[in-house]
Image (cartoon, rainbow, N blue to C red):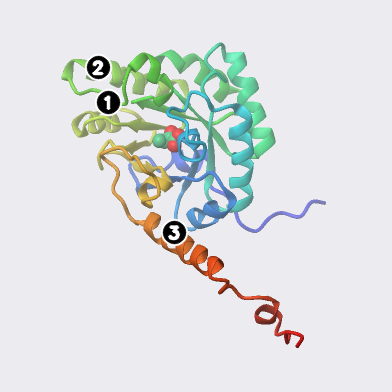
């Protein structure tokens, strides 16, 4: 008989059931140590492909691979206990066909033990979302600004700036909701459009640069901690950690250079031989 673990993790249906209720708190994490901290306060941890920018210094998320997502997804699962962990499907791992998407999602879920995957795209991904959902893969969709499409979009500009574009984005939201996504990230859209989407679909909307008119919010952890050199304009900083980290590193380097660092006698109470 197997031993059951005491802490119950949130599931995709738990998050789906939060529509219109208490706001959903979500942050990214890519490591076990940050996951442990984020896990205490968040409903959902996103292992975002923004790790390509944040951890690896790429200009875009396009170079991120399935292997990178799996490695960090597994680390986040080991560091967390109660949040739903959602792992991003990277560019090139799901767009070619529904079958390709299922193989990639199954690898992510088997090798990380996460509870759901996220993919970018609206109406064009609806069939894939239905295919995955019907086969046991909970899908969080991502509409509005979709960073993996940077090479066709041309820039990371807010979406739906003209009212004429709203119908297309609302149609994306409707399509992925009807296809069976359990929630949707809405990135960089104006408040009136975010409100219309949130009011018109039956699954929770999680905004990033999309106002409080959503059912929850997600930010990139390093951006809100003040660790990222470049952040989108909409990001509120809740900390300013870069100067504190730099001061600690400078203090360390200064002590080492002046041989002021402790030896074993400090650590183990050993008396130096005379
Ligand atoms: O990759 C990521 O971190 C994301 C968020 C910006 C929503 O997709």
How far apart marks 3 and 1 lie (CA) works out to 31 Å
In the foreground, 202 or 97 = 97
- Ligand 1's image quarter is top left
Q: Is residue 86 visible?
A: yes
Q: Residue 59 carries which label?
A: none
Q: Which quadrant holds residue 185?
A: top left
Q: Which mark is residue 157?
A: 1
Q: Mark 3 points at which residue?
A: 245
CB at mark 1 closer than 8 A to ligand 1?
Answer: no
CB at mark 3 closer than 8 A to ligand 1?
Answer: no
Residue 198 as seen in the image, left or right of residue 54: left
Q: Which of marks 3 and 1 is in front?
A: 3
- From the viewer's perspective, is residue 255 above or below residue 28? below
Residue at 77% of width from left, 85% of height from top?
273
Q: What element carries label 3?
A: helix
For the residues labelled 3 and 1, say whether their Cβ atoms are less than 8 Å apart: no
Q: Is residue 122 visible?
A: no
> Looking at the picture, how far across and down is residue 148, in whole percent?
44, 23
Q: Which of marks 3 and 2 is in front?
A: 3
> Looking at the picture, how far across and down is residue 181, in whole percent?
46, 27
Q: Which mark is residue 167?
A: 2
Residue at 52% of width from left, 69% of height from top?
255
């Amino acid at each position: 008989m197997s031993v059951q673990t005491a802490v119950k993790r949130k599931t995709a249906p738990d998050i789906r059931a939060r529509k219109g209720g208490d706001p959903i708190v979500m942050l990214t994490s890519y490591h076990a140590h940050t996951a442990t901290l984020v896990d205490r306060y968040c409903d959902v941890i996103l292992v975002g492909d923004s790790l390509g920018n944040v951890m690896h210094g790429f200009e875009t998320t396009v170079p991120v691979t399935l292997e990178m997502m799996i490695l960090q997804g597994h680390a986040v699962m080991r560091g967390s206990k109660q949040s739903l962990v959602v792992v991003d499907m990277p560019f090139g791992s799901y767009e070619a066909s529904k079958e390709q998407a299922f193989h990639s999602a199954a690898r992510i879920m088997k090798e990380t033990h996460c509870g759901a995957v996220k993919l970018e795209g609206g109406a064009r991904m609806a069939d894939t979302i239905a295919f995955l959902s019907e086969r046991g893969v909970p899908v969080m969709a991502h509409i509005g600004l979709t960073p993996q499409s940077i090479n066709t979009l041309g820039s990371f500009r807010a979406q739906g700036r003209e009212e004429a574009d709203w119908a297309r984005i609302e149609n994306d939201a409707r399509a992925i909701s009807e296809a069976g996504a359990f929630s949707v990230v809405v990135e960089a859209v104006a408040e009136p459009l975010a409100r219309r989407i949130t009011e018109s679909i039956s699954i929770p909307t999680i905004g990033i640069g999309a106002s409080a008119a959503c059912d929850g919010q997600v930010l990139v952890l390093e951006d809100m901690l003040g660790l990222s050199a470049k952040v989108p304009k909409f990001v509120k900083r809740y900390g300013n950690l870069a100067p504190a980290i730099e001061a600690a590193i400078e203090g360390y380097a200064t002590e080492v250079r002046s041989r002021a660092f402790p030896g074993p006698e400090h650590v183990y109470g050993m008396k130096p031989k005379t």
